[in-house]
Image (cartoon, helix red, strand yellow):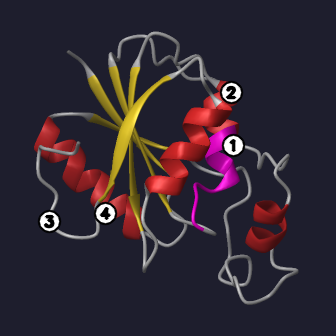
Amino acid sequence: MSKLAAYFSASGVTEAKAKELASVIGADLYEIGPAVPYTSADLDWMNKKSRSSVEMNDKSSRPALAETEHDFSAYDEIYIGFPIWWYTAPTIINTFLETFDFSGKKIVLFATSGGSGIDKAVKDLKKQYPGLNITGGKLLNGKVTGDIL
């Protein structure tokens, strides 16, 4: 069974956990990169006009991806990782899920967070994408082990 650990990381924390996860479960690695990288000012969640605040307050926001053509057909399991923003997945994860075809694949979510859980993100994404096989998710703030679910 072929596995892929795809991740979006704005500050490097989720990237480090994605690399650990890929190593532990024997998965390939793929970065979900934004077309325009986020700056520290973009990530200032205290500023209602920062890029991340504006994106998260607009449910239709779909930040552009750096790469819009990639063949994921060889993978049976796709692990998708992200930092928790406003208690859920950043809107670039919506862009990723809507840009590529993940039908028939098992999708497992993982996240990093300074204090929020992943449950709302899992619930939100399952509701938004009922046609995808999103099986659950786990926070990877500590040691990464093979029992992600």
- The tag earlier along the polypeptide, 2 or 3, is 2
Residue 99's mark? 2
- The tag earlier along the polypeptide, 3 or 1, is 1
Q: Is residue 32 above or below residue 85?
A: above
| Residue 108 located left or right of residue 122 | left
Residue 16's mark? 4
Q: Are discs 2 and 1 less than 8 Å apart at CB? A: yes
Is 122 colored magenta in this rendering? no
In which quadrant of the rendered view does residue 88 lie? bottom right
Which contiguous range is marked in magenta?
Answer: 87-94
| Residue 126 located left or right of residue 3 | right
| Residue 99 located left or right of residue 105 | right
SS at circle 3: loop
Q: Mark 1 = which residue?
A: 65
Discs 4/3, front: 3
Residue 143's mark? 3
Residue 67 visible, this angle: no
Q: Residue at x 33, y 31 (%)?
A: 4
- The tag earlier along the polypeptide, 4 or 1, is 4
- Residue type at tag 2: Thr
- Residue type at tag 3: Lys
Marks 4 and 2, how far apart at CA: 24 Å
- Residue type at tag 4: Ala
| Residue 68 located left or right of residue 78 | right
Marks 4 and 1, how far apart at CA: 20 Å
Q: Residue at x 67, y 49 (%)?
A: 92
Marks 3 and 1, how far apart at CA: 29 Å
Is 92 colored magenta in this rendering? yes
Q: Residue at x 55, y 23 (%)?
A: 70
